[in-house]
Amino acid sequence: MIQTTNGRVQRATKSELLLERARASIAGGDNSTMRVLPYHLPLVAVRGEGSRIWDADGQEHIDLNMAYGPLIFGHRPPRVTDAVVRQITESGSQLGFPAELSARVAEKVKLLYPHIELLRFSSTGTEAIVAALRLARVFTERRYVIAFEGHYHGSSDNIFHRYHAPLEELPEGAYAPALPGTLGMNGAPVDVLVCPWNSPEALEKCLRDHADDVAAVIMEPVMGNAGVIAPHNDFLEIARALTHEHAALLIFDEVITGMRVAAGGAQERYGVEADITILSKALGGGYPISALGSTREIMQSIVEGRLFHGGVYSGNALVMAAADAVLDEIHRDSAAIYDHLNAVSGEFAEGVREVFTRLGIPHQVNQVGPMVSMILTSGDVGPIRSYRDIRRHCDFEKYIRFQHQLQRSGVYFHPNQFEPLFFSTAHSRQDVATVLERIEDGARATLLA
Ligand code: PMP
């Protein structure tokens, strides 16, 4: 097929052709909106190994997306693959009965998250969070949930708020009822209030104004869905103290941070314990798992079956075998794993700052262990501490131009700069050095106009 771009005639790539074919059968060409945004440069992936993917045109990319986070050990880590193959060839992918494997995985999770006494597994972050919010409401017999601007907790009607709202839609006051995150939600999410991130005053006011009726405060303990923004000035400790004071539960959505910012997630890194923890991505190492964990007392309504929690694929044996292998790896070698993840991410973050500073390109690189975001800003800005700061200063168009150039040079990260970059144990320091060289070339080509 022949295509015209910028007046030039070009042969379509195999990725373009495959996407065109997919669009005839799959709505929009793929199964998640975030993977086929209008400004995505077409890339159909064929194969992954370690820190690399290969596309349909045979081009190799250093992958800094890691399937949006799960691939903590890179693509196809042999120990995880072997465990999965053993499970499906010797026992079966799905037996549909209670199994020792689930209990074993739960025991290994509990060693890392000490507040957890009981767990339930499911397949996606969205599902675990739906259950967590119901659990909090049942346990406290209260109605409201407080969430934060820029934080994403899955696409369900009970929490999907407009987390990337334009600045002009954000309220003047300390907090506001959540706006629906997409079409078709009939006014949901219901009874969800949204505060700015890192504002103790707003959270306190919201809790006080709804005294005795807030079931839970839910947060990504490190915001990772609108750039990476760490909790500042003891915000986690303050949120913990305020929720205790108001007898509301604190839910940490550790879908991204769990087994990433430390083996024990943000709770280990910051020394603050939640009442309910949600885990997902890194726990499965690339297989669809999520977990909801809490104390025996809080989980009692699920134990007794008063609160329904189910799922045909919850605790699927193939997925559990993968998680079992991931956890074994973490328990075997935690220091080496997190030292390496911190080292490559730190070298990358420092290197990008150095390149952009030397070239005079306004930027902010935020890093919390192996969570990094590279933000191109519209000018020099002060500290970025909230969704509003990042939204006010980031330059999406510039980033997309830059990302397209990097993708052409064989480095992949998501074209929306709100998506973090993810490193794995498969990324070497040589990978980082190669990426930094390509970043400098790409920045010279697209950002120095
Ligand atoms: N919570 C957080 C913090 C997430 O990043 C995501 C997914 N990106 C979810 C929840 C939802 O997970 P899933 O897409 O598996 O439903």
Image (cartoon, grey):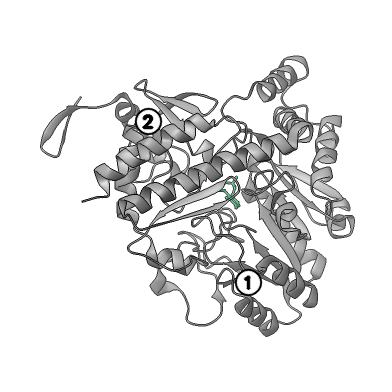
49 sits to left or right of 87: left
* Residue 322, picture quadrant: top right
Image coordinates for residue 120, horizontal then vertical, percent: 78, 46
Q: Which mark is residue 342?
A: none
393 sits to left or right of 16: right
* Residue 217, picture quadrant: bottom right
Whether residue 29 appears in this view of the structure is no
Type of residue at label 2?
Gly
**Furthest-top residue in this view:** 89
Task: Pick whichever, 362 or 148, lies toward us.
Answer: 362
Type of residue at label 1?
Asp
Tell which tag, 1 or 2, sits nearer the viewer: 2
Q: Circle 1 — which element?
A: loop
Q: Would you call the spot at circle 2 few (<14 residues within 10 Å), some (14-19), or many (20 or more)? A: some
* Residue 277, picture quadrant: bottom right
Q: CA distance from mark 1 to mark 2?
A: 45 Å
- Whether pointer 1 and pointer 2 mark residues with C-beta atoms closer than 8 Å, the reply is no
Q: Which residue is mark 2?
A: 410
The residue drawn where x is 73% and y is 17% is: 86
Q: Which mark is residue 191?
A: 1
Whether residue 267 appears in this view of the structure is yes
Q: Is residue 403 above or below residue 85?
A: below
Q: Circle 2 — which element?
A: loop
Image coordinates for residue 5, horizontal then vertical, percent: 17, 37
Q: Would you call the spot at circle 1 few (<14 residues within 10 Å), some (14-19), or many (20 or more)? A: some
Q: Is residue 47 above or below residue 292?
A: above
The residue drawn where x is 72% and y is 68% is: 237
